[in-house]
Image: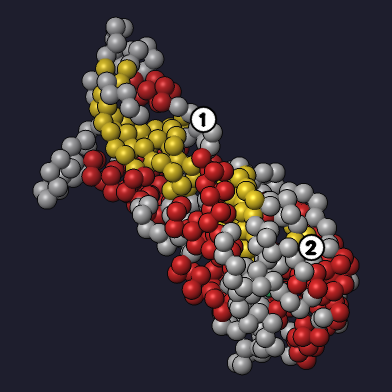
Amino acid sequence: MKSPIPDYLNALLEKARPIEDGMPAQYIKTLANADTSKLAVALVMADGNVYSAGDDKVEFSIQSISKAFVYAIAIEDAGLDRVLEKIGVEPSGDAFNKLSLHKGNNRPMNPMINAGAIAAHSLVVNPNATAEERTDRILKTMSRLAGRQLHVDEEVYQAELEDADRNMGIGYMLKAAGVISCKPDEAVKGYIRQCSINVNVRDLAMMAATLSNAGVNPATGEAIIPVDSVRQVLSVMTTCGMYDGAGDWVSRVGIPAKSGVAGGIIGALPGQVGIAAFSPKLNDRGNSVRAVAIFEQLSRDMGFHMMDVSQIARASVSTSVAKIVAGKEDPHHRNCDRSVVIFALRGAVRFAGSERLTRAIVRELGDPNPKDPGSGKHQDACAIVISLRDAFSLNAVARRVIHESIIRLLAEEKNVVVIDPNDVLKMDLGKLPTSQHPHIVQNEKEAREYIGGIGCSAVIQSDNW
Ligand code: DON
């Protein structure tokens, strides 16, 4: 079978192609003369699988999309507290290049407008670093994010530099306000250089997918951005990434995003996919008209809106009851003919999933509840199996809730077996008394043998765990 996804992406491009609104950025010739027929889209799944269609090898300058990644680098180099001291996280509702600072605290409103981005650039490496050191650090990190060596487009850089009066004005304003401590023209030149790095849609989708994949490049497996920084970057992309169009974008598309004046837009849907679209004609907010249309359509077709509540935690736990059946051997294991209750968790488990598990355990093993017929039926079960075989991950809260549930079951002298082939439980047994250790096994067979005894050739009647 041929995958339907490339065909879908081609159809998506053909739908966007007739849109002729907008025009390419006019402030420098290189962008004003861009080939406006170019159109491309790419998706990178959180496991690194890449799909692309259209002009997916055509390179263009990353421009303001770089701001999201340089913000992450600034957090790593200067620390989040220092970055927040210098740059706010409030949407400005203004154009990206407005000479503006927050009235109350004299900080740039956020790192996605130029004032905040130039301040973030100045925090890369350290405040006394040279422009070359900062550019080198940024180019290397962006290349690791894209999974290939990227380069600065020198023609774009020179042209931007000749037209940099406004950004220079912002740089001097930042210096006068005490937001940056290096020379303003150094920070602005470095910022312009970061904007002049060339990419194609596949590079951008991989960079976005690294954000979606908790900071780990899904193709190379390299951990590049710490998870806390990823959360910070995605939050700011959500509220400020599309400038004065941010509210409209969040309600219509619902994917944390960032756009650039060369016509690229990235979207990073946490845990799922990194997306990039490209076409040079812009609307009056500075966002590519066709790329916006592509994102709107993709979000609708694929259910990508992050506020989509169609997936709920109910599906993540299933309960089944099995019986250990006596085999031929004598004497039989003491658990023969007794029941085992199996709780299977599926997917990426968070608080809601772990709460479902504790509720299911209490229902089966707790006191009967007169309002809930069938509850409390398995108080005398010979073992409780928690199967994490299909649990992709547990977040910190889910892990705490499950650890605590296991400790409570063991305190009631229940026999607890955990099937954990992917090592997601991560219970620090060294810190716990042995009475609080569950029996951890790799698969169902080992669990059955442990509960029923090998000598008894125990089998389970219902084999669905
Ligand atoms: O700061 C500038 O003028 C540009 N080089 C980058 C701005 C940009 O991409 C704005 N985004 N839509």
Q: Which residue is mark 1?
A: 1
Residue at (24% x, 40% y) in the render? 365
Residue at (84% x, 70% y) in the render? 157
Image x and y of residue 404, in percent? 39, 49
**Height in image: 188 above or below 142?**
below
Image x and y of residue 391, in percent? 45, 40
Specify whether residue 198 is in view: yes
Amino acid bearing label 1: Met
Residue at (80% x, 55% y) in the render? 150
Distance of label 1 from label 2 (alpha carbons)? 38 Å
Label 1 sits on a secondary structure element that is: loop
Q: Quadrant of residue 37?
A: bottom right
Specify whether residue 399 is in view: no
What's the mark number on residue 197? 2
Residue at (45% x, 27% y) in the render? 443
Ligand 1's quadrant: bottom right
| Crowdedness near tag 1: few (<14), some (14–19) or many (≥20) residues, C-alpha within 10 Å | few
Q: Earlier in the sequence, mark 1 or mark 2?
A: 1
**Height in image: 447 above or below 206?**
above
Image x and y of residue 74, in percent? 72, 68
Q: Quadrant of residue 41?
A: bottom right
Whether tag 1 and tag 2 are in contact, CB under 8 A, the answer is no
Amino acid bearing label 2: Ile
